[in-house]
């Protein structure tokens, strides 16, 4: 129903022995149903699955990716296991891991305990300096829009109708390093300079205003966000 309504649908499957042996069947069925993405999440209980089975599963996923299936990892492979797929990890940005004893970690693979929910509230743990320092260890996992765009430079400046209004399709969280833009299960990070631009995307300013105050780089950033479906454009604005 969601697919027929025009909604982009993705699937999430736990990476466990019973699913690893049926990977081709699972992704084929998801593709038939119209899924745009197929994420695989490793079970937090590392004793539930042996290393050999896990390695076999990662190899099968790589092969499915080469065959054109939109498969991806939701978390990092265990230490010592290499995988050709880049994880789409949201640890420390829009999610965190809490073990059965209430210990807060950036993700289930991290050994660093940032605090305990039974002793302190989530808001305190998430915002206090010690926790932020620990969470910043995961910042290299963030998908940076600006970095991604610079890796494939366009020799021509972004040409957009200056009368368009960029409309936000994200919610924003300010971080010490800049800002995190979240849309559904996806997110991107921007630098402090980029954060000053995106905080102005409220649907009330035309592109010519962004160029006047921030220069061409603002249009490049907004266009990158548009391409990744984090903003839309409107011409007539009331």
Image (cartoon, grey):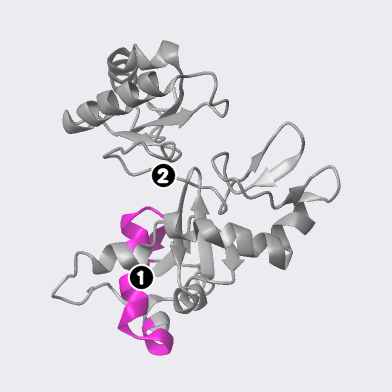
Q: Indicate whether 25 appears above or below 36.
A: above
Taking the spot 59% from the left edge, 67% from the top edge, the residue there is 174
Percent position of residue 88, x then y:
41, 44
Q: Is residue 202 visible?
A: no
Question: Which of the labelled discs sits on residue 28, or is there none?
Answer: none
Say whether residue 163 is left or right of residue 184: left
Picture residue at 45% right of the left edge, 19% below the top = 50
Report, in whole angstroms, how far the alpha carbon at label 1 lies from the one at label 2: 21 Å
Residue lying at the far left of the rendered structure: 155
Q: What kind of element bears circle 2?
A: loop
Q: Is residue 161 magenta?
A: no
Q: Main secondary structure of the magenta part?
A: helix
- Local packing at callout 2 (Cα closer than 10 Å; few below 14, some 14-19, many 20+) is some
Q: Which residue is mark 1?
A: 221
Q: Is residue 51 left or right of residue 217?
A: right
Dot 1 surroundings within 10 Å: few (below 14), some, or many (20 or more)? some
Identify the mark at residue 88; answer none if there is no mark: 2
Residue ID at (34%, 68%): 146
Which segment did they paint magenta? 211-235
- At horizontal 63% and vertical 50% (from top left) the residue drawn is 112
Q: Is residue 82 visible?
A: yes
Q: Is residue 209 left or right of residue 61?
A: right
């Amino acid at each position: 129903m969601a697919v027929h309504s025009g909604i982009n649908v993705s699937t999430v499957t736990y990476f466990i022995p019973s699913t690893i042996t049926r990977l081709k069947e699972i992704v084929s069925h998801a593709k038939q149903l119209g899924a745009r993405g197929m994420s695989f999440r490793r079970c937090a209980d590392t004793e539930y699955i042996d290393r050999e089975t896990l390695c076999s599963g990662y190899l099968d996923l790589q092969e499915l990716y080469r065959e054109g299936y939109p498969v991806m990892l939701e978390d990092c492979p265990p230490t010592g296991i290499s995988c050709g797929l880049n994880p789409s990890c949201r640890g420390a940005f829009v999610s965190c891991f809490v073990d059965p004893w209430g210990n807060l970690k950036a993700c289930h693979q991290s050994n660093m305990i940032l605090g305990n929910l039974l002793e302190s509230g989530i808001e305190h743990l998430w915002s206090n300096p010690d926790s932020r320092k620990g969470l910043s260890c995961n910042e290299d996992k963030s998908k940076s829009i600006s970095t991604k765009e610079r890796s494939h430079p366009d020799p021509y400046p972004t040409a957009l109708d200056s009368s368009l209004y960029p409309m936000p399709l994200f919610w924003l969280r300010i971080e010490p390093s800049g800002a995190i833009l979240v849309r559904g299960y996806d997110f991107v990070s921007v630098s402090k300079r980029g954060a000053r631009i995106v905080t102005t995307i409220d649907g009330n300013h035309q592109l010519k205003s962004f160029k006047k105050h921030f220069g061409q780089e603002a249009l490049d950033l907004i266009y990158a966000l548009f391409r990744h479906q984090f903003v839309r454009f409107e011409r007539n604005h009331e």
